[in-house]
Amino acid sequence: MKTSSPPTAHPKAALLATCIRLQEDKAAISRSAMEDVQASANEHNGAMEDKFESFRENCQIQRDLFARQLDDALTALAVLHRIDVGNAPPPVVGLGTLIETDKGGRFFIAISLGPVPDPAGGAPWLVVSKASPIGQALVGRRVGEAFTFKGEQHLVKALG
């Protein structure tokens, strides 16, 4: 079965660059929040309270939360950097594939980012991971193949 041309005229590289920028922003926000909480804990001069309810303990818990968010953001960023933006459309859906369906769905298999504006000004792309429910339904499909998602039948129209 043949694969069609990429779903839109804009290069996949532009969409990928947008996703990378969004993910870098998430990482920067987490890093900044983590550093702010740590600085606040270091500056705290209050009297020691019950050690499990102290201000510093709460700051440490928050810092750890932001550190996990930063780690997740950096891990997702590494996935984005592994995506090949070669010109030839892939034969099957996998990491880095753009997909258009017969019901207007536009997907980019990468990381879970949700809707991302189309750099070319078209309808947004839904950026999903391979592990997401829709990602699992799409991975391995070819142009012309049907898949079921949420009880509804869809058809893969184009890959890019």
Image (cartoon, grey):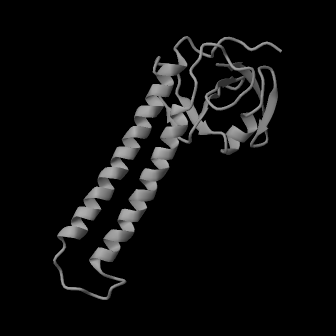
Image height of 133 relative to 34, above or below: above
Q: Is residue 137 left or right of residue 30?
A: right
Image height of 67 relative to 15, above or below: below
Query: Which is nearer the eye, 122 or 81?
Result: 81
The x and y percentages for residue 101 are 70, 25
Q: Quadrant of the N terminus?
A: top right
User: Going by the picture, which residue comes out furthest to the bottom?
Assistant: 50
The x and y percentages for residue 125 are 55, 29
Q: Can residue 118 be seen at all in this image of the molecule?
A: no
Can you tell which quarter of the image residue 148 is in?
A: top right
**Residue at the image position 74 percent from the left and 14 percent from the top:** 3
The x and y percentages for residue 124 are 52, 27
Can you tell which quarter of the image residue 149 is in?
A: top right
Q: Is residue 94 left or right of residue 15?
A: right
Q: Quadrant of the C terminus?
A: top right
The x and y percentages for residue 2 are 79, 12
Query: Which is nearer the eye, 1 or 102?
Result: 1
Tell how many labels: 0
**Residue at the image position 80 percent from the left and 20 percent from the top:** 144
**Residue at the image position 51 percent from the left and 42 percent from the top:** 76
Can you tell which quarter of the image residue 96 is in?
A: top right
Q: Can residue 148 be seen at all in this image of the molecule?
A: yes
